[in-house]
Image (cartoon, grey):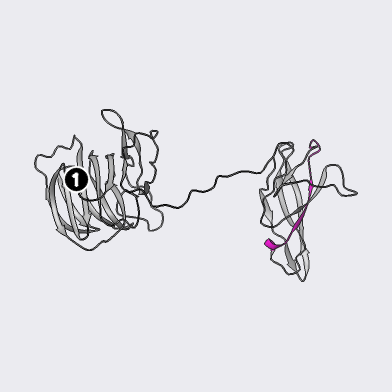
């Protein structure tokens, strides 16, 4: 099958048309198949004009078909050799010259109707293949993918061990992945976490990819902090914290009331109106930290 690989647009100089050249690789000879495209410009833009292609095919080719809005076939004009064909091309169309048979136009399904993001939302990552990026999660820095869960099953892991070479001014705050609806207001975000190093966080009302939103951060030494973006609102430390086991983090945002819970114990309740709506997110330092049983729902639900 031949498809154009290079092209030079036709132009118009003092009303004289200039041809465009398409170069098409030949699968039979390995040499380029040259086609000459001429357009009748008349001062019209290139894309709005029809074109005529005269192609010299390899001697071994004996069949050529063309599809564009239904079956159309090239013609051989009087005086042309057997291996030459002439085709008129419509604007804004894609053509393929081929020495095979059985071509047809592609098909597509009707796109699904637009609908709101599911709420409540939950994912335990058991329906994916290892290495998958789970549905609806959009990594902004780092990489969050489905990994084996210690003890059996699957979970989500941040797998990048260190910051790479940055493109332009794209530092961002830390590895994080966002999900949900940008119009979520009152919601609880919950996740089980296993901290291998550094810290993890869950958050909501995401408003800025550099500074995130409301952030409930838990470090591997038991230190915790509740932030609005880079501003610490309250902090503390859990007693007898065991980093070798899973912990459940819960962040409830209802109006200006913000509550942070670890393993069923409320560690912070405050009032802050800095953020009003936004998606949920998960964050991690550059360590192989794990997340599971992600849930977003209405505050007051378990």
- Position in image of residue 132 (x %, y %): 40, 38
Residue 261 place in picture, x, y as percent: 16, 47
Q: Quadrant of residue 243?
A: top left
Q: Residue furthest top?
A: 151
Residue found at the far left of this picture: 239
Quadrant for the C terminus in the image? top left
Task: From the top left corner, tell me how far across and down residue 81 is, in percent.
Answer: 87, 44
Q: Name the residue under label 1.
A: 219
Q: Which residue is drawn at 14% across and 58% down?
A: 270
Question: Split into 4 quadrants, where in the image is the N terminus?
Answer: top right
251 and 297: which is toward the camera: 297
Q: Position of residue 104 (x, y in %)?
A: 68, 41
Query: What residue is rendered at 39% in x and 43% in y?
Result: 135
Q: In this view, does 100 lie to the left or right of 144?
A: right
Q: Give the range drawn in magenta.
A: 46-61
Q: Is residue 80 visible?
A: yes
- Whether residue 137 appears in magenta in the rendering, the answer is no
Residue 161 visible in the snapshot: no
Image: 190 above or below 43: above
Question: In the image shown, does 214 or 6 lie closer to the viewer?
Answer: 214
Badge 1 element? strand
108 is higher (above) or lower (below) than 155: below
Compare residues 66 and 119 and report the one nearer the observer: 119
The number of callouts visible is 1
Corner quadrant of residue 239: top left
| Residue 56 within the magenta-colored segment of the rendering | yes
Q: Is residue 300 left or right of residue 9?
A: left
Q: In this view, does 285 lie to the left or right of 241?
A: right
């Amino acid at each position: 099958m031949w498809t154009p690989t290079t092209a030079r647009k036709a132009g118009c100089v003092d009303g004289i048309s200039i041809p465009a050249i398409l170069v098409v690789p030949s699968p039979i000879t390995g040499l380029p198949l040259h086609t000459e495209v001429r357009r009748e410009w008349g001062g019209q833009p290139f894309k709005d004009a029809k074109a005529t292609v005269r192609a010299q095919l390899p001697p071994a080719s004996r069949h050529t078909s063309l599809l564009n809005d239904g079956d159309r076939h090239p013609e051989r004009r009087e005086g042309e050799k057997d291996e030459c064909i002439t085709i008129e091309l419509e604007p804004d169309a894609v053509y393929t010259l081929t020495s095979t048979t059985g071509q047809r136009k592609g098909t597509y399904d009707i796109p699904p109707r637009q609908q709101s993001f599911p709420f409540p939302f939950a994912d335990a990552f058991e329906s994916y293949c290892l290495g998958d990026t789970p549905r609806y999660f959009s990594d902004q820095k780092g990489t969050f993918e489905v990994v084996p869960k210690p003890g059996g099953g699957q979970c989500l892991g941040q797998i990048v061990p260190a910051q790479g070479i940055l493109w332009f001014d794209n530092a961002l705050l830390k590895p994080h992945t966002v999900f949900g609806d940008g119009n979520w207001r009152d919601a609880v975000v919950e996740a089980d976490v296993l901290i291998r190093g550094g810290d993890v966080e869950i958050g909501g009302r995401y408003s800025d990819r550099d500074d995130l939103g409301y952030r409930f951060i838990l470090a591997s030494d038991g230190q915790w902090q509740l932030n609005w973006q880079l501003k610490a609102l309250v902090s503390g430390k859990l007693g007898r914290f065991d980093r070798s086991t899973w912990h459940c983090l819960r962040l409830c945002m209802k109006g200006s009331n913000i509550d942070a819970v670890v393993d069923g114990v409320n560690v912070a309740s405050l009032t802050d109106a800095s953020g009003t709506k936004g998606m949920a997110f998960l964050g991690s330092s550059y360590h192989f930290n794990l997340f599971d049983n992600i849930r977003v729902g209405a505050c007051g639900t378990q």
